[in-house]
Image (cartoon, grey):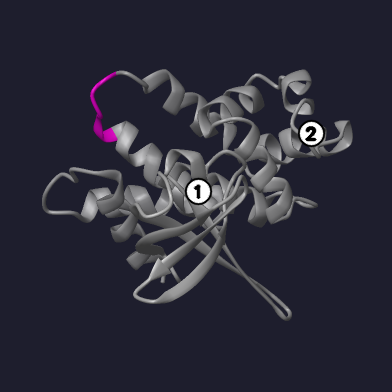
């Protein structure tokens, strides 16, 4: 799995870039408008990536932040009928925070304005994220904690969200995170540290 690439921007288009990594050009699909924030041709950048494998297709998708990539993975892995193109359209139309707030509020009108999303698809996304995956309660808790100093609960919540986006069920994610925190000899200082410890328990 290619987690990130560090190289020189060789070409920048509205929905994809070409990244020169030591003489090898990688074409990376990114959310519409995303490449503009990376820089201009010739700039050295670091892009978070996900390699999508399907039959004969190998496609690299790129992201500016881990939050974007987590949301992308959550959508394509946990919502029926949502593939990479739809997930990219969502990320290109609104940021992860705005999307999560709209889902939590069940704001179907706002979500329906996203290019490529019909009313039925929007309803399915909200329904499955809320009831099937059960992630909206965690998003709501994270939103309420925004702006405050990162407490242990908020770090644990971020780790749970990351596990859910990787395809783990909500109950398993909560159990692994709770066990990782209980068995650690010292308090965790970041959600990434909790995530790594929880993943070791889930393997």
Mark before the other along the chain sequence, 1 or 2: 1
Depth check: give the residue in front, 32 or 184. 32
- Residue under the point 62% across and 24% down: 104
Residue 185 in percent (x, y) is at: 12, 53
Within the image, what quadrant is residue 58 found in? Answer: bottom right
Q: Which mark is residue 122?
A: 2
**185 left or right of 113?**
left
Residue 1 at least partly seen: no
Residue 14 in percent (x, y) is at: 61, 45
**154 left or right of 102?**
left
Depth check: give the residue in front, 24 or 182. 24
- Residue under the point 51% across and 25% down: 140
Q: Residue furthest bottom?
A: 56
- Residue under the point 43% across and 28% down: 142
Residue 9 in percent (x, y) is at: 42, 57
Magenta stretch containing residue 184, yes or no? no
Depth check: give the residue in front, 151 or 35. 35
The vertical placement of 140 against 87, above or below, is: above
**118 left or right of 25?**
right
Disc 1 designates what residue?
70
Q: Which residues are magenta?
A: 148-152
Residue 93 at least partly seen: yes
């Amino acid at each position: 799995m290619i987690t990130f690439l560090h190289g020189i921007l060789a070409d920048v288009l509205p929905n994809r870039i070409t990244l020169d990594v030591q003489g090898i050009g990688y074409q990376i699909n990114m959310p519409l408008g995303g490449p503009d924030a990376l820089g201009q041709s010739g700039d050295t950048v670091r892009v978070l990536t996900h390699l999508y494998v399907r039959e004969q297709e190998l496609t690299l998708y790129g992201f500016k932040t881990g939050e974007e990539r987590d949301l992308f993975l959550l959508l394509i892995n946990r919502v029926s009928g949502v593939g990479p193109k739809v997930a990219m359209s969502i990320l290109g139309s609104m940021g992860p925070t705005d999307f999560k707030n709209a889902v939590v509020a069940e704001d179907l009108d706002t979500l329906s304005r996203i290019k490529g999303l019909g009313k039925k698809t929007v309803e399915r996304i909200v329904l499955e994220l809320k009831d099937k995956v059960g992630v909206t309660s965690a998003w709501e808790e994270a939103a309420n904690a925004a702006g405050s100093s990162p407490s242990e609960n908020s770090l644990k919540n971020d780790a749970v969200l990351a596990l859910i986006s990787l395809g783990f069920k909500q109950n398993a994610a909560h159990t692994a995170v709770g066990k990782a925190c209980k068995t650690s000899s010292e308090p965790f200082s970041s959600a990434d540290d909790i995530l790594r410890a929880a993943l070791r328990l889930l393997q």
